[in-house]
Image: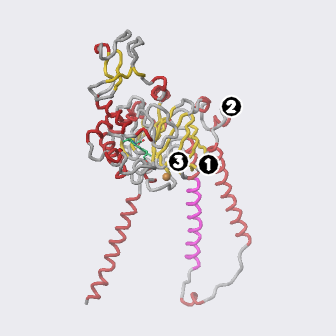
Amino acid sequence: MTKQIHLSKFPQRFTVFIYGFLLILLGSCSRIDHKQSALDPKGLVSQNQYDVFMLSVWITIFLFCAVGGCLLFVLWRFRAKSKEEAMEVPEQMHGNSKIETTLILASAIILVILAVPTLQGVVLMNRVPDPNDQATLDKLELDRSQIEDAITVNVTGKRFFWVFEYPQYGIVTANELVFPASKAVRVNLRTEDVIHSFWLPKLAGKMDLMPGQENFMWFIADEKKIRTGIDKDGNPYEVDIPTAMPSVFDGKMRQAIFAKQAFTDEFEAVGGLFYGQCAEYCGNSHAYMSFRALAQTDKDFDEWVLKFRNAQNPNLQPSAYSSQNNYDKGDVVTFSDKKLGDDMSRDFRAVQAVTKGQNPETKPDAWEKVHSDDFEKGKALFSSLQCVQCHAINRTGLGAKGPNLTLFGLRTSLAAGWMRNDETSLDKWLRNSNDIKFGNLMWNGEGIDDRHPLRQLEDDDEKVSQLVTYLLDLK
Ligand SMILES: [Cu+2]
């Protein structure tokens, strides 16, 4: 009796299993235009790689059908039609040299068809075209200026974030590569620790960063594709520039991204926002070692560069007030402010021309506070809690252990592209970054243990909130 029940249940369970399995498989399917999809190229180099890939896909589909078709045909055509026939031993023969030669030739031809565009792609990927080679530029539909005015970004991979240095401008940032959409971008890849891999699927493909070796890749975005939207009926339409490529320098990009859906669901990415990822296992936080590339119009890119250059220019940092100097309207000085606390100073801006000796204490009307009290307190904490050990703000700080935080308030993401850079996530990050990004080298860095002030912020609402205000107001 029991046995029967078992037997009849078996197929039912099997069906459930199959459906469950299919459901899981379906769940792993994703949209072709997913944020990290190589099947949705938006640049010349990635388009080339996509084309080579599709060529090999079509060739394999053809081979699959041809070989599978022959097999099916033979199985059907030469099937045994009766019991007697099935007992017969068919005529034994040894190959067919004509068919074999044809097959070898056909395979060779297919390999050549694959090899030529592949090698062309390798050449394309490894070298920015020569601006004097008009024929190549024509073939790639590039303008000479797009190559001549190329920008260079030195990328350094570190566990578990990215340093982006712009040697032409003398500026350094982290985790967000801002670039002009109309220009080629040369990417020099280095690592300071283990092997990483720079993968920017929609623009550039993938390249390893190897210790002791400099690798290279380049990319150029396709502005037309960035500016093409697809409406509900699947028809393409042109998106205006402020929507397709919101400006980074004034925070519009950040607003546009934050206005979209939940962080993990940013499928409808803002056109100029591209997602990248470390694609070579480099340690426990590897999966969270992502980055972003933000395309900009030439004008917005220049504004961003200017803002960064000014912020990281040592000659433009406010100096301490001196009673020997006259100051012009707009000049900024640092001057002590007892209201903030003992030994605290803050930035004051002259609201009018100021003559010698008129300091913010003796002539308060002539000066205004540049930042809020919380900003100034946060700034002081940034030094006293030893954040400066590892982070540079308003200087390039190449070689620093942590990401450069200059103009951090303009950044869209936190912890190497892993979270949205807003008050809530930053608050969590500062309280306990290990909870958010396990194994990260802020919490677990060399010489960091429970006595380090950064590990004592968990329950310190006031300090955390002042640090958050300071960091997000850097813009
Ligand atoms: Cu990695």
- Give me the C-alpha separation between circle 3 and circle 1: 16 Å
Q: Is mark 2 within 8 Å of ligand 1?
A: no
Residue at image mark 1? 212
Q: Which residue is mark 3?
A: 198
Residue 164 screen position, x and y as percent: 51, 39
Say which residue label 2 marks. 132
Characterize the local packing of mark 2: few (<14), some (14-19) or many (20 or more) Cα atoms within 10 angstroms: few
Judging depth in this view, the residue of 183 and 287 nearest the camera is 287
Residue 119 place in picture, x, y as percent: 66, 50
Instruction: Determine if the C-beta at disc 1 is less than 8 A from ligand 1.
Output: no
> Element at badge 2?
loop
Question: What span is in magenta?
Answer: 55-78
Residue at 57% across, 30% down: 168
Picture layout, residue 191 above or below residue 317? below
Determine whether the residue tagged by mark 3 lies in a helix, strand or loop.
strand
**Which label is found at residue 248?**
none
SS at badge 1 = loop
Q: Residue at x 40, y 30 (%)?
A: 242
Nearest to viewer (mark 2 / mark 1): 1
Q: Amino acid at mark 1?
A: Gly
Q: Is residue 328 magenta?
A: no
The amino acid at mark 2 is Asn
Q: Position of residue 259 (x, y in %)?
A: 32, 38
- The answer to whether the beta carbon of the residue marked 3 is less than 8 Å from any atom of ligand 1 is no
